[in-house]
Image: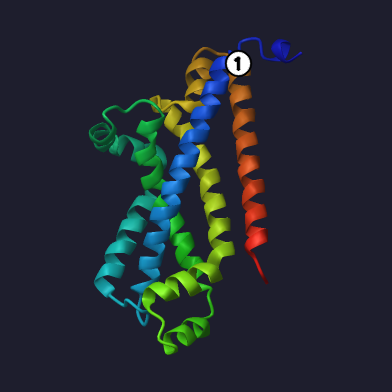
Amino acid sequence: MVESLFPNVDWENMWEATLETLYMTAMSTFFTFVIGLVLGIVLFLTAPKQLWANSIVNWLTGAFVNIFRSIPFIILIILLIPFTKFLIGTIRGPNAALPALIIGAAPFYARMVLIALKEIDKGVIEAARSMGATTWTIIRKVLLPESKPALLSGITVTAIALVGYTAMAGIIGAGGLGTLAFLDGFQRSREDVTLMATILILVIVFAIQFIGDWMTTRSDKR
């Protein structure tokens, strides 16, 4: 039944492409979370009247975030080709897609982190400061726990966006379902290959959304 609906699909290649997409999504999501979290915290703490208030650092960090958040991903991939080739040694394959994926998504997530931190009741932060808590303690015991649901919700949205980015990266041969859909499906006029790749991408997206919603709900103590 399945073979008759998708006669041109090489299931071994499709499975390999799915694993590559999962690998790119997982790795880029992890590094996006770490880098985006750091950038978001720096943006928050260096703002006026905050613990690390510093207009220069805040402006420079904000400029970096705004610039890379604004560049369309397909253009960013092209701009980063020399950097990717220097870092990875090639511009093809799943690993070659990671620099563009991370640099493209981390600033986006940083803004979501900043929004989440701004929602924290200022009184809670002031209470911690009045009790002599260090900045690191405030970050670890106040900022992160209080914003946890929003941070998890934000990384869920970002991870789903990264799945779409991996598909776009497939156009330049980054591997994964995007490459398979483009090279083996679109260029060879095999609509069933493109359709199956699309279905698998949707399954991945739905799975990420389900897991993200579950984690967000579990972490929300309100």
37 versus 12 height, above or below: below
Kindly identify the residue that appears in the image at 47 percent across and 62 percent down.
113
Q: Is residue 141 left or right of residue 60?
A: right
Kindly identify the residue that appears in the image at 52 percent across and 38 percent down.
163
Label 1: few (<14), some (14–19) or many (≥20) C-alpha neighbours in 10 Å: few
- Considering every residue shown, the one lying at the far bottom of the view is 130
**Residue 52 picture location, percent across and down:** 32, 76
Q: Which residue is mark 1?
A: 11
Which quadrant holds residue 4? top right
9 versus 198 height, above or below: above
Confirm whether residue 114 shows in the render: yes
Kindly identify the residue that appears in the image at 55 percent across and 64 percent down.
148
Q: How many marks?
A: 1
150 versus 102 height, above or below: below
Q: Nearer the viewer, residue 66 or 174?
A: 174
Confirm whether residue 165 shows in the render: no
Give the residue type that dot 1 points to. Answer: Trp
Quarter of the N terminus within the rendering? top right
**Residue 5 picture location, percent across and down:** 71, 14
**Residue 86 picture location, percent across and down:** 23, 34
45 versus 16 height, above or below: below
Label 1 sits on a secondary structure element that is: helix
Look at the image and name its color scheme.
Answer: rainbow
**Residue 2 picture location, percent across and down:** 72, 15
Kindly identify the residue that appears in the image at 49 percent across and 87 percent down.
127
Which quadrant holds residue 55? bottom left
Quarter of the C terminus within the rendering? bottom right
Q: Is residue 159 left or right of residue 57?
A: right
